[in-house]
Image (cartoon, rainbow, N blue to C red):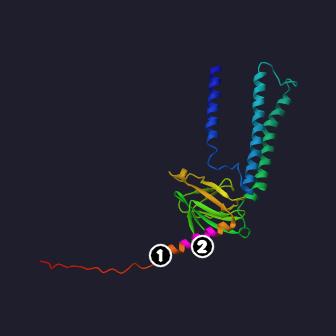
Amino acid sequence: MRGRCVAVLVLSGVCSVSTVSGCGGNGQSALDPRSGPAHSISVLWWWMLVAATVVFLGAVGLIALAFLRRRRPGAPIVGEREGFNLGMVTLFGIGIPMVTLIALFVIANFVVMPDTDAPAASSTALTIEVTGNQWFWEVRYPGTSVVTANEIHIPARTRVDVIATTADVIHSFWVPELNRKIDMIPGRRNRVLLYADRPGRYRGQCAEYCGPQHAHMSMYVFAEPPDRFRSWLAARQRRHFRVNFRSTRLPPRRTLTVIVSPTR
């Protein structure tokens, strides 16, 4: 019995270490917020963890108490009382879960959701169109001819309205350090706010399985100072114009000589 308990503890430790080791290192963490909406999400997550921890520890404590007093009837101090047992079941089975779930529902829907919801068109300074493809991201900047793949450039400390669509299957657009995830559904246009408190590079990922190469469907959001962003956009616009101008030039004329042999 003792050896079995040790084995279970060792296995649990190995599983915990393996799980934690995959939680960092790529700069993609919802618990490292870089914007107001992402901060609200992280605060909600921590409160959910606290509530779950309290409930878990309470349940473990009651199980441990029942195990230690398994040979003695009744609860400590109060002894055997039917009303006490019913009250404990009502409190821990109905009361505490209801209060916890209602509190989380109110906070999530009336505090966090308004902060992370799609922005009004008049409240943003820039609009970007992102299209999910198998298996890359196509990014367009309306009003320009600039197109990028797997990278999004935005000005820092600026509200950006992202219009998300898909060209094939369902994808999910998610940059956890900046905001929540949104689904990209064929035939629909969803929107999400991107806002970065300071310049930096933020990793995003498709959060909906979309085929064999789903794991490689990542992106980077580059938040740059507004002046540098405008310079980057202008430079890409000029480069695109030069490429288009060269591609529209007619090729030089060539003379083709055809030699026809008489048939026999």
Q: Which mark is residue 246?
A: 1
Q: Dividing the picture into quarters, in which one does residue 95 lie? A: top right
- Give the class, few, some or many, for how many residues have Cα within 10 Å of label 2's Cα (few <14, many ≥20): few
The region drawn magenta spans 231-239
User: Can you see residue 1?
Assistant: no
Q: Amino acid at mark 1?
A: Arg
The spot of residue 180 in percent (x, y) is 68, 55
Q: Dividing the picture into quarters, in which one does residue 110 lie? A: bottom right
The spot of residue 19 in percent (x, y) is 63, 39
Identified at 78% across, 30% down, the residue is 61
Q: Amino acid at mark 2?
A: Thr
In the image, 28 versus 97, the foreground residue is 28
Q: Nearer the viewer, mark 1 or mark 2?
A: 1
- Residue carrying label 2: 144
Mark 2: secondary structure: loop
Q: Say above or below: 253 vs 120.
A: below
Q: Say above or below: 193 vs 253.
A: above
Outermost residue, right side: 77
Give the mark, 1 or 2, whose residue is nearer the N terminus.
2
User: Is 180 covered by the magenta stretch?
Assistant: no
Identified at 80% across, 34% down, the residue is 89
Identified at 73% across, 47% down, the residue is 45
Prevailing secondary structure of the magenta residues: helix
Outermost residue, left side: 264
Q: Dividing the picture into quarters, in which one does residue 148 lie? A: bottom right
The spot of residue 163 in percent (x, y) is 63, 65
- Give the class, few, some or many, for how many residues have Cα within 10 Å of label 1's Cα (few <14, many ≥20): few
